[in-house]
Amino acid sequence: MTERSALTYKDAGVDIDAKMQAIERIKGRAGATFGGHAGPIGHFGGTWRLPAGPDRIMVASADGVGTKLRLAFVLGGDAHARVGADIVNHCVNDILALGASPLFFLDYFAAGALDPDVLALVVGGIADACQDAGMALLGGETAEMPDMYRPGEYDLAGFIVGEVAPDRTVDGSSVRPGDVVIGLPSDGLHTNGYSLARRIAGLTGDPGHDRAILAQPLPGGDESIGVALMRGHRSYLRDVQPLLAKGIVRGMAHITGGGLRDNLPRCLPETCIAKIVQGSWSIPPVFEWLVTEGDVPVEEQYRVFNMGIGFTLIVRPIDAESVTTALPEARVIGAITPRVTSDEAAVQGLSC
Amino acid sequence: MTERSALTYKDAGVDIDAKMQAIERIKGRAGATFGGHAGPIGHFGGTWRLPAGPDRIMVASADGVGTKLRLAFVLGGDAHARVGADIVNHCVNDILALGASPLFFLDYFAAGALDPDVLALVVGGIADACQDAGMALLGGETAEMPDMYRPGEYDLAGFIVGEVAPDRTVDGSSVRPGDVVIGLPSDGLHTNGYSLARRIAGLTGDPGHDRAILAQPLPGGDESIGVALMRGHRSYLRDVQPLLAKGIVRGMAHITGGGLRDNLPRCLPETCIAKIVQGSWSIPPVFEWLVTEGDVPVEEQYRVFNMGIGFTLIVRPIDAESVTTALPEARVIGAITPRVTSDEAAVQGLSC
């Protein structure tokens, strides 16, 4: 506590004026996502008018992008918009797995010092994905936190709220032995497994070094490692909503952190297990490369990566064909069988 | 991409099992906050049953704790629970400023490597504060992000959803010249201004060095600098709800980042300005010390720090006494006057 000259917030690394200007820029993007339900921007909370109606189930979820962000730091440009859209789609799929339609979204963006251009790219990606999902970007927090993040780095989280009618909630409780598991393809790693993928690829965080690696062709693929790793988190909203309207879906899982092994059980009753048939879908080159290059044990593969399946549906056998007809990319990847002993693994067929 | 032995997620710094165990520990704390509205824990989203009813306004907000976290890193123990409660109370006050009652909360906790004990302390603080506010801790995201955060450090954000009847929304549109501004005392810095406060106090992030500074007595106060800086973010829910029930509140502001200068205008119509009377409340010693020690310009003081006022209410003059009677700590701190020119500052009286 030595003598010093007058100190302002800006001296301490927080530039409120720059933040206000950056927020003015993103307000327009957020505003474009508003339907008739949302109130004005700029108050202490975002408001959403919910019309009178019967009992409804609100479904909420929070999630982050994880260390896919570190690729965006190195690649810059569109990669910032990409992770913005990723966090939205991740959240959309999470509540979709319960049968819910998205209503509104809020983001949390934190950096050591705000770069208005990066913020605009990220929020642009968020706003576009919100619009695609038909939901409002209702607000968010833009935090400038000196000494917390390195220059050029940031963290990004998303919060979503949706709704579903009580008799339309899908929680897996109606899943029965004999039902089939249908897998919908992922577009890549989505937002999971990046700490292992970065390690396997030999990424260090040094921009020059990492860009050189990311520019290399993906073995077995027809694109670069960077393009393959930056592919977006696919939203399953448009594919799945028509099936929900038909009432034929008994259980759904969003295949994120934990992979098929940990996520599929979340929509299974205690009395059931899922038997997955390896080879019933084609594993994209990026996963083949990662697990070979990293010599990743098989059990680990299906827990860290989605391995080409981003979302699963459980339906009666009689309904399977209507799903695979409506969604030509969908594959029957397994079946539900009765659980015989209580210590039996809930997902089987994924280890050698 | 040199040869190496088999790689697992754990090798890459992500321990899914440890995370699952930590989450099992915090599930109980979250469960304790559930009323009859919330569904089971562990699915892809938290569910909340909203009973049938007329039009309602959902109010949502996202926020972070900011670099008050850096004090918690150094102090440890209860300070982790403290910042957990802080983010909840911050969010509660944000939606309260629109007249909304809290329904549910989700958190985002991100660290380089998960420390289950620290996570349990933070989530414990969150759960206790949620329970105090009568809302459910419906879910959250616990992110393990190697290479993003330094050992022992984490970021923390919160997301709240509440509701208010359309005819009970308070947005400041009924504020009129002649109304009075009432200030409710803060308990300290709450969660704003810490980057400047840390700079003024000479904190570096080195635990030994910082703990020695934080243990020093606060000049003009009867506690240590550390105790003063770690005081919690006060929730104004219980104080303000009875006034909302009476329908006497015309405008409210939660005094957070931006201080009285930037937050008070958020509940003022374009036609009004607020004239604040400096000296109408006593400024706590921690602020006197910070602005003196840092030689912080007066205008900056009221934009970075709350300076002892954590929440403001605008009421008709006839209702002021009932507020100050119900809340003995409340002070009339200013009045609303007509805006004469369009370039006039919305808040006056805070600069010399």
Image (cartoon, coloured by chain):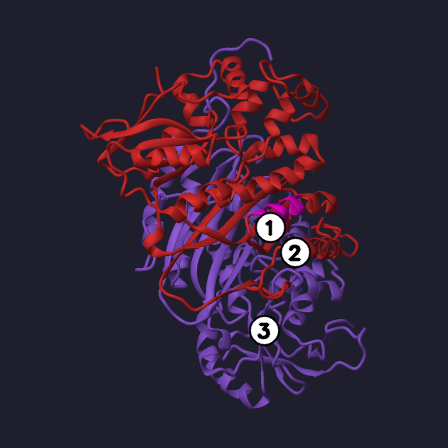
Chain colours: A purple, B red
Inter-mark Cα distance, 3 to 1:
27 Å
Report the span colored magenta.
B122-132
Task: Rate crowding at label 2 as few (under 14), some (14 to 19) or many (20 or more) other CA atoms within 10 Å.
Answer: some
Whether label 3 touches label 1, CB < 8 Å: no
User: Which image quadrant for residue A15?
Assistant: top left
Is residue A328 found left or right of B22 in the rendered image? left
Q: Amino acid at mark 2?
A: Ala
**Image mark for residue B131:** 1
In this view, B268 is above or below B344: below
Q: Amino acid at mark 1?
A: Gln
The quadrant of the picture occupied by the C terminus of chain B is top left
Confirm whether the magenta stretch covers residue A190. Answer: no
**Image mark for residue A53:** none
Of labels 2 and 1, earlier in sequence is 2
Residue B203, given in percent of the width and then of the height, sits at 62, 22
User: Which image quadrant for residue A291?
Assistant: bottom right
Q: Tag 3, which secondary structure? A: loop
Viewer-closest of A208 and B240:
B240
Task: Rate crowding at label 3 as few (under 14), some (14 to 19) or many (20 or more) other CA atoms within 10 Å.
Answer: many
Q: Amino acid at mark 3?
A: Asp
In this view, A211 is above or below A48: above
Is residue B7 found left or right of B154 in the rendered image? right
Residue at 48 percent of width and 74 percent of height: A240
In this view, B288 is above or below A154: above
